[in-house]
Amino acid sequence: MGKEVDLTLGSSGVLSEDFTNPYKESELKIMYEKLRINEWANLVPKLRKGGSGMSAKDLRIKAEQVIRDGLRQSQEDTQKVIKTTEALALGSQERSSKTKTAQYFESAIQNLQLAVYHEKVGIYNTQKLQDIPEVLRPMFEDCYKIGCLMALHNPPVLLNFDNSGQGPFPPIKTECSSTDEEMADHRVFIAVDLGMDFSGYCFKIAESEQIQQPKWGKEFGFNTPKTPTCILFDGDQKFFKFGYDAIMTKKDEAKQLYLFDNFKMELHKNKLHRDVMLTSKNGKKMRAMTVFSESLRFMKDHALETIGKHTAGVKYSASDATWILTVPAIWSAAAKQFMREAATEAGLVTESEPDRLIIALEHEAASVWCKQLTHKQFMEEDLTEAEAIMKVPGTQYMVADCGGVNINITVHEVMEGGHLKELNWATKTFVDPKPIDKHFKECLRETFYEKMCDALEEKHPSDLQKLMYDYNGDFKFLSNLEQLVRKVEEKGASSRGSPETQRRILQIGDKLKLLHDNRIRSIESLIREILTGRKISYMFLVGGFALSPYVYSFVKEKFEGRCKVLCPADAQMAVLNGAVTFGMRQNVVESRISRYTYGIKIVEEFDQTRHRGKRKYVTKEGKAYCNDCFHCFVKKNESVSFDEVSEFDFNPVERDQKHVQFDLYYTESKSARFVDEPGMVKIGSLAVSMPGIKSGSPRTLKLQVKVGCPEMQVTFIDVNTGEIGSVKLALMSK
C-alpha cells in the first residue's frame, strides 16, 4: 500500500535534508483516509461471509480489534524511541533554537524511528499474524505500515484512540506543545437542542463523569432545565434577546421588533432553501437562516461562558468542543444540511472542520440515554438493582418520545458491547400539531375578553409563562389560572371569581382536556401498533408530555402486562443527555432501518426494449444512453450498518468530461428502476470534480455512499490513481 520508501543517509551519517520528511502530512492523511474508508469498506463484505471457522459477527469484532491493535502497536513502537531520545536531549531552550545541534538531534530521532520501521516491516508477517484470520492479514499489514509512516514525522502524526468516532479507525490528531496538550486533556462535548417549545444544552468535560446543564429563568422566578424557544431582534435585525428574556418583553415593545417563537417546524417543509423567510409576530419577515444561526450563536456563547465557570478559569473557544445538534427523525436531508450551515454561520464549527459537528437523531439520543440508566433514575423504582439493560445482549426495548407536536417510537435491541440495533421506528403527528402554549393562549383569547388577555400578558407575564410551563395534563393549573385572573380583576386572594369567570375557566379546561385526550389516543394507538408481534422487555416514556402523571398512569395501565413501563425522572432531558453520549460514541447505534429506498439517477446504454419511451442522451461521439435510470444504494426497511458503504463504479460518458452531477432520489418502492416513476422524490444532488486526465484516457471512478448514518456521507475515488476526489452535496433547493 502506498509508494516505496527510499531513504538515504547523508555524508554526516544522518538523514540528508531531502529525506527528513519523506511523506508530507497531507499525503499521509490521504493514505490513512483510503485505508479507513476504501479498504475497510472492501473488507466488510468478506467479513459477512465469515472465515476461519468464525461467524461473520465474531469475525467483525475480531477485525476491529486487529485493526486497532495494528495501529496502536506501530504508534507505540516509535513513541518509545522518541521518549528515549528526548531523555538524552539538550535543554529545552537549545532544542527549540535552530542550531546545528538541534537539527542533528531531530535527524537522529528520525534515524531511530526508521530503524524501528524497517525492523518491524521485516517481522510483522510472521510474528504478528499468527493468531489473525487469513482474511484480516492484508488489512493488518496496511494498518501497521501506515502507523509507522505516521510516526516518522517530527512531531509525529498521531491517532486519537480516546475519541474513536465511527468504526475501528481513530481520527488523526497532530502532537502539540505542552500548553496545547493541557487543553487537549480538557475536551468538552456540548449538545444543543433547539426544541419546538423549549431549548437548551448540556455538556460534559471528557475527564468528568457528570453531564451538566444550566438552569434558566431564575430572574423571572423560574428554575427550569430549558428556556422558551423564542428569539428577539431589534429594528435593524440584530440579535437582541433569547429565551425568557425575549418572551418577557413587553407587548408594545415587541411590536416594534422582530419576535419569533416555535419556529423549529419551519424546517419541516418540502422545499427548503437558504433564503426561506420566517414571519415574526408583527408580520415582518427575516431569513430563517439568520433566526436559526443567531439562536445557535446564543447557545454557543452561553455554553462556553457556563463551562468556563466549571473549569477553574480555563477558557474554552468553540474550536475546543465537539458539538452535537439534535434533530427530529422526520427531518429531511435538506433540513439537516440547513442546520449544519446555520451552525457554521453561528461559529460552532468552521467549514474546514465539519467533523466537529455531529447531527444526532432525537429518538436515538433518548434511547442511548435510557438504556444505561440505573434503577434509581426512574420516577418509580420499578427496576431492580441487579437489572442492567445495557449489559444484556438480546434485550429489546421501546422508547416513546412524547414531544410537543408528535410522538416518535423506536425499538432497539442491545448487542454485544452495548451497541444498539434498530428494529423499528415510527412517528405520528398529533391531530392538531400546535405547541401546547399556543393552544393555551388561543383558548384564553377565545374564552376571555381581549382586555383580560392583554392584562395577563402585560402585568403578569412570568405567572402566565409559569402556568404554561407547568401544564402537564393533570388540570391542577385551573385553580392557578383562577388565582391569576383574580389578580387582574384586583380581587382578594381569598375571594372566588364570579360565576362567569369560573364558567370560562372550566371551558378552557374542557378544551385542553379534549386536546390532551386526543393526543393520548394517538400515543396509545402507535404503541399498540409497534408492540404487535414483538417481545419488548421495557418501554421508556420520555419528552415533556411523558411527565404528565395522567399519561404515565394511562400507558402503564394499558401496557404493563406486555412490558415494564418506565419513565426517567429526567425525562425532559433524555434527548440532550443522550446526545452527549452519542457524540462521544457515534457507533453506539450499530445499525438502522432505512426509511426509504435511496439512490441516484444514472445513464445506461440505450436499449430499445428496456428503455422504450424514456429520455435519450447522445454523446459527442454519437453513443446513445437512457438518461432516467435509477441506481439503488439501499432499499426501504433494509437494515444498514453505521459504517456500511454502498459503492457505484462508473465511467464518464464523455472522454473529456471533468465534472459529473448525480441527482439523489428517494421512494417508497423497493423495486424502482427509473427516476420518473410515481412516488420518486428528488432530494438533491452531488457534484463530483474528477481529476484532470488527458482527453481520451480510460477512467473508472467509484462513488462510496454511507447511508447508515444520520447524515449521508459520500466519497469519490479515482480507481486508476487511488486519488480521493471532492464531492459537494447540495440538498437544499437553492
Image (tube, helix red, strand yellow):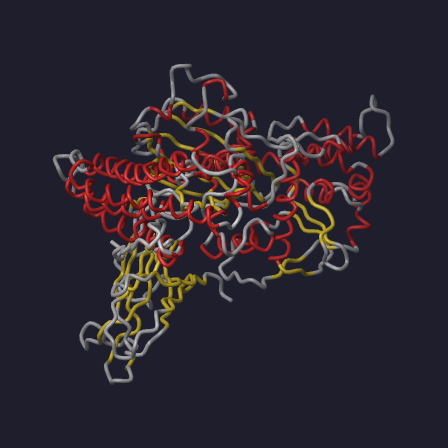
Q: How far across and how far down the image is residue 703, in percent?
A: 31, 61
Taking the view exactly as shown, the residue that stands out farthest to the left is: 53
Does residue 430 appear anywhere in the picture?
Answer: no
Q: Is residue 143 left or right of residue 235?
A: left
Q: Is residue 518 above or below residue 36?
A: above
Taking the view exactly as shown, the residue that stands out farthest to the front is: 12
Looking at the picture, tell me which residue is in the foreground, 144 or 479: 144
Q: How far across and how far down the image is residue 204, in percent?
A: 54, 33
Q: How far across and how far down the image is residue 93, in percent?
A: 55, 41
Looking at the picture, tell me which residue is in the foreground, 695 or 512: 695
Q: Is residue 139 left or right of residue 198?
A: left
Q: Is residue 466 left or right of residue 324?
A: right
Q: Residue at x 49, y 62 (%)?
A: 732
Q: Residue at x 24, y 53 (%)?
A: 1
Q: Is residue 250 above or below residue 419?
A: below
Q: How far across and how far down the image is residue 46, in percent?
A: 18, 46
Quarter occupied by residue 498 = top right
Q: Is residue 536 left or right of residue 257?
A: left
Q: How many marks?
A: 0
Looking at the picture, tell me which residue is in the foreground, 253 or 722: 722
Q: Is residue 687 above or below residue 166?
A: below
Quarter occupied by residue 245 = top right
Does residue 270 appear anywhere in the picture?
Answer: yes
